[in-house]
Structure formats: C-alpha cells, structure tokens
Amino acid sequence: MTDVSYTAQTEQPEASLRDYYELMKPRVMQLVVFTAVVGLIAAPVSVHPVVGFASILFIAIGAGASGALNMWWDRDIDSVMKRTVKRPIPAGKVLPGEALNLGVALSGLSVMMLCLAGNLLAGAMLAFTIFFYIVVYSMWLKRSTPQNIVIGGAAGAFPPVIGWVVATGSMAIEPWLMFALIFMWTPPHFWALALFMRNDYDDAQVPMLTVTHGRPATRRHILIYTVLLFVLAVGTGFTSIGGPIYLAAAVILNVLFLKGAFAIWKRDEVIADADDYLVERKFFKLSLWYLFLHFGAILAEAILRPYGLGGWS
Amino acid sequence: MSLKHEHEIHKRRKSRNVGVGLMLGGFVVLIMALTYVKITSGAFELPKVEVSQ
C-alpha cells in the first residue's frame, strides 16, 4: 500500500540544520553575542562563567528567534530584493510556517531560560527586544515610515544593556551609552547599504529614506548622524566605561567615519554610479569595523581594569 | 517485508536528527551545570525569616 500524502511530501526539498541556522540571521547573532558579552564584562559585578555563558547563549537564541520571525513576516519582500532572495524561505528551503513555529518556540524558550539563568529584569528586557524587533520594527515601522531604520535600530541596541543587567540585576547610565552608540550607528550603516543596493528597496516598496526623500537627502542624513555619533562616541570615552584605549580608538575611528560620511555627502549619483558606489561600499565596510572596534575597546578597558590599567583611575 | 526496514526518510534526515539530538544533549548538560552553580552559590536559598515569639 502506498502512502500518497507521504510520497507527495518527499518531493519537497529537505531543509537541513544549516537552513534553520541561516533562518536565525547568524551575522546579526554574532553582533548581538559580541555586544552582550561586552555589556556583561564591562559591568562592575562579576558573574560565574557558567551563568555568563548560559545567559549569552539565551540572548543569542532570542536574537535568532527574532531573525526567524522577521524572515517569516518579510518573506514577500525578501523574495523581491536581490540581497535577501537567497534566504531560506524565498529560496524554498524552509516553509513559512516552520519559520514561524521555530521563532515563537525559541522566543519563549530564550526568555524563560534567561529569567532563570540571569534574572527577571534581563528576561523581560529580552522579551521586549523581541517584541520591539518583530512588532514595532518589522510589522509596523519598516513598511510605513522612512524613519524605520532610526527607531527600529533600537532593537539591535539592547543586547549590551541586557548583558549588563544579567550581571548587575539593575540599570545604570553606562549600558545606555553602549545602547546609544549602536542606536546612532545603525542609520548611517543601513543608509549606506541602501545607497549602493540601488533599486532593492524601491522594488520591494519599502519606504527607505532613499525611496521617500531621495538619495541626496539620504547622503545628508548620513553626514548628520555621523556628526552626532562622533560627539557621542568620543564623549563616551570620558565616562566610566571609557579610558585611554577607548578614547584613542574612538578618535581615530570617528575621524575616518566622518571623512567617509563627508565624501558620501559631496558625491552625487552620477559620480557614484561611475565607480559603482565605491565610497558608499567602503563606508559600509568601515561601519562594521567601527562598531566592532568601539566595543572591542570597551572590552579591553574592562579586562584591564582589575590590573589597574583600564579606565581613567 | 521486514518490520525493521529503515525508511528512506530516516536516512535522509539522519544528519538533522543527530544535530537536534546533540543540541538537546548539550541543553541538558547546560541546565545541569547551571543548576549546580545556582545551588552551590546559594542563589536558591530561601530568605531567612525571623520568627517572632
């Protein structure tokens, strides 16, 4: 006897573990893990390594769950944009329902486990971050306002605050400086991407600044945010999470970043098109190093502090 | 036909199932380690209540 329903199912391509991993946006997870670790280590309270490891793992799983839910919600526009067309759902490797189930299950698991491994406040903050990324950013802002990246960037800025709260169980000004750093960095980072991905967002009808206000306005916005970021990033160097290493790194990186933003502002589409958006691509690549090195410097200050080398003391 | 015949789907999903099994095993070990650390560090101790006479 033949099981007809089963035979039909076997004709579907089988999703591998790798596909489910891709569904969790591993690159975003790397950034989340790194910034959460920095928040955890920069906190003035030490955490048992097992508790620290478990907490970071559950924060990463929460971020991965958000990624899966985001891919489930955005599957229609992902299949239109060149940058996202190879994602597991548009590529036909994972069914939308599977992504939704995985996202919901891992969201619940990560929040519950972070409450147990860390504390209730950290768990609640992770739950809010997932809610913010999926409901506020993906479902609401992304398709309705050109400020989508600005406000939605907050979701990616929460991990260092959660890391800090895991260690201390309370709030302080320092983790919010780290939050502000990522928050202010996100718009120029994504707007540079939107400039050189050209028609991707137009085709998907996502109201990115490039689509609604045009490319010259986007270039202007990149410069304005970079100037504000300069003040914030260098100013953080004089706080308790800063120190000589951080300040030196911040000054160098922000001068380079500002130089890149200024070059973007000075260009127009004709010049940019001629060299295939070389300056915008370089700026985007620099933005990745920018964030990594800023948080690396905060981490270095925190690690050296017990030896009397880090910070200003 | 043997009752122990391995279905094609089992072969196809073997690596996925092994992966999920390893993850679940790792999760169990992590929970055990976490519980041990929490108990030994006194995180599970109930607050002492002074009994008023």
Image: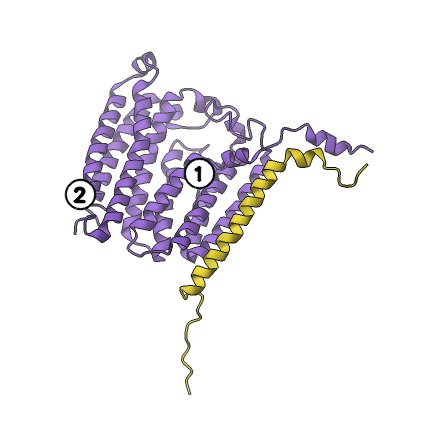
Chain colours: A purple, B yellow
Residue A116 appears in the picture as rendered: no
Residue kind at label 1, given as amino acid type: Tyr
> Considering only order in the chain, which callout, 1 or 2, is on the residue closer to the N terminus?
1
The residue under the point 44% across, 44% down is A60
Q: Residue at x 36, y 49 (%)?
A: A163
Question: Quadrant of residue B39 in the image?
Answer: bottom left
Q: Nearer the viewer, residue A169 or B2?
A: B2
Tag 2: amino acid: Pro
Which quadrant does the N terminus of chain A fall into? top right
Tell me whether the residue at label 2 lies in contact with that at label 1, contact meaning CB atoms closer than 8 angstroms. Answer: no
Q: Nearer the viewer, residue A212 or A278?
A: A278
> In terms of image quadrants, where is residue A257?
top left
Query: Which chain's residue wears label 1?
Result: A
Distance Cα–Cα, label 2 vs label 1: 36 Å
Please provide percent x and percent y for residue A254: 22, 33
What residue is drawn where x is 62% and y is 37%? B14
Disc assigned to residue A78: none
Residue A179 in the image: state x and y as whole percent.
32, 44
Residue appearing at x 20%, y 30% in the figure: A255
In this picture, residue B29 sits left or right of residue A230:
right
Residue highlighted by disc 2:
A244
Local packing at callout 1 (Cα closer than 10 Å; few below 14, some 14-19, many 20+) is many
| Label 2 vs label 1, nearer the camera | 2
Residue A178 appears anywhere in the view = yes
Residue A28 percent across, percent down from the top left: 42, 36
Residue linked to disc 1: A137
Left or right, residue A28 beside residue B5 = left
**In the rendered image of this protein, does residue A223 appear above or below residue B39?**
above
Where in the figure is residue A180, as x and y percent of width and height? 30, 42
Label 2 lies in what chain?
A
